[in-house]
Amino acid sequence: MSDRFVQSVGLIVATVGALDAFISREWDLLVVFLLIVAVDLLLWLRLRATRTPVSLRPDLARWLDHQAQRTGEPFDDILDRAVARQRHELFASSGDDGILEP
């Protein structure tokens, strides 16, 4: 199952819970469900960003996660910088900038 699918299911479940809390006039429960919906929606929108999903070897993912925890820098930023550096090293001497046209 993809992350988007799981996030979508969570969003649907929280929305149904909020609707049920509204119908049953459980205002405190409604607030809790609405907060869950808001957080879930933000995460869902973030997953829909224009980033291309890629597979990464488990050892590299662990290293990136360790680096992110050690430095406090986001996982994605470390990954972007590592890929950009590797691309630069691959194409710096050939005169090709490595940019693919759409």
Image: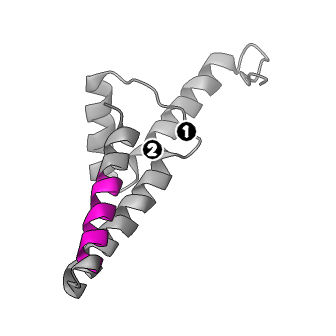
**Position of 47 compared to 10: left or right?**
right
Classify residue 90 by image quadrant: top right
Q: Which residue is mark 1?
A: 51
Crowding near the residue tagged with mark 1, few <14, some 14–19, many ≥20 C-alpha atoms within 10 Å: few
Look at 37% across and 48% down and name the residue there: 8
Q: Residue furthest top?
A: 94
Magenta part of the protein: which range?
Answer: 10-22
Closest to the observer: 70 or 50?
A: 50
Tag 1: amino acid: Arg
Q: 32 or 85, which lies in front?
A: 32
> What is the C-alpha distance between the residues marked 2 and 1?
10 Å
* Residue occupied by mark 2: 76
Q: Position of residue 18 (x, y in %)?
A: 29, 71
Secondary structure of the residue carrying tag 2 is helix
Q: Secondary structure at mark 1?
A: loop
**Residue name at image x 31 percent, y 70 percent:** 19
Q: How many numbered marks does the figure carry?
A: 2
Please identify the quarter of the rendering in which residue 42 is found: bottom left
Amino acid type at mark 2: Asp
Main SS of the magenta part reads: helix
Whether the residues at callouts 2 and 1 have beta carbons within 8 Å, the answer is yes
Colouring convention used in this rendered image of the protein:
one colour
Counting from the top left corner in percent of width and height, residue 38 is at 39, 68
Please tell me in which quadrant of the rendered image residue 23 appears. bottom left
